[in-house]
Image (tube, rainbow, N blue to C red):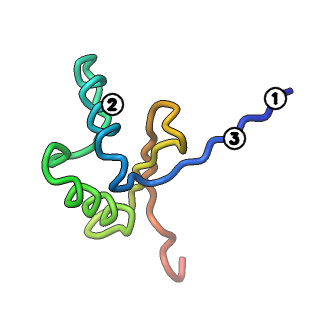
């Protein structure tokens, strides 16, 4: 049996060009790669909004992750931290 590991990570400033290309390709096929409004604006602003989502600023904590090495695809995980005293 072959065991394959998948490492996920957040987008970085160096990911701008490949992420925008992946978004353009997927958009032509009716899919969204970069999430949310503003993905076509300033990249550092977009990364800041993704960090806010990860930190749970103003909403449910969400993480937007891509595979290490850019094999293909992305994933989004949404969760709420446990309530204190629950």
Q: Which residue is mark 2?
A: 22
- CA gap between label 2 and label 1 equals 28 Å
Residue 5 circle label: 3
Decide if residue 65 is on the left or right side of residue 52.
Answer: right
Residue 85 circle label: none
Decide if residue 36 is on the left or right side of residue 69.
Answer: left
> In the rendered image, which quarter is residue 30 located in?
top left
At horizontal 49% and vertical 37% (from top left) the residue drawn is 70
At horizontal 29% and vertical 31% (from top left) the residue drawn is 21
In front: 44, or 56?
Answer: 44
In front: 43, or 31?
Answer: 43
Name which of mark 2 and mark 1 comes first in the sequence.
1
Name which of mark 3 and mark 2 comes first in the sequence.
3
Q: Is residue 40 above or below residue 56?
A: above
Label 2: element kind: helix
At horizontal 20% and vertical 60% (from top left) the residue drawn is 45
Label 1: element kind: loop
**Mark 2 neighbour density, 10 Å: few (under 14) some (14–19) many (20 or more):** some
At horizontal 44% and vertical 38% (from top left) the residue drawn is 74
Q: Position of residue 62 (x, y in %)?
A: 39, 56
Q: Are marks 3 and 2 in contact (CB under 8 Å)?
A: no
**Mark 1 neighbour density, 10 Å: few (under 14) some (14–19) many (20 or more):** few
Q: Is residue 81 above or below residue 40?
A: below
Residue at the far right: name it.
Answer: 1
On the rendered image, what quadrant is the C terminus found in? Answer: bottom right
Q: Which residue is mark 1?
A: 2
Q: Position of residue 67 (x, y in %)?
A: 52, 42
Q: Is residue 36 above or below residue 45?
A: above
- CA gap between label 3 and label 2 equals 22 Å
Residue at the far bottom: name it.
Answer: 85
């Amino acid at each position: 049996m072959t065991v394959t590991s998948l490492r996920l990570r957040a987008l970085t400033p160096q990911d701008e060009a490949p992420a925008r290309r992946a978004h353009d390709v997927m958009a032509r096929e009716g899919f969204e790669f970069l999430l949310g409004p503003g993905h076509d604006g300033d990249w550092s602003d977009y990364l800041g909004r993704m960090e806010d989502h990860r930190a749970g600023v103003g909403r449910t904590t969400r993480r937007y992750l891509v595979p290490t090495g850019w094999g293909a695809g992305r994933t989004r995980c949404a969760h709420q931290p446990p309530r204190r005293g629950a």
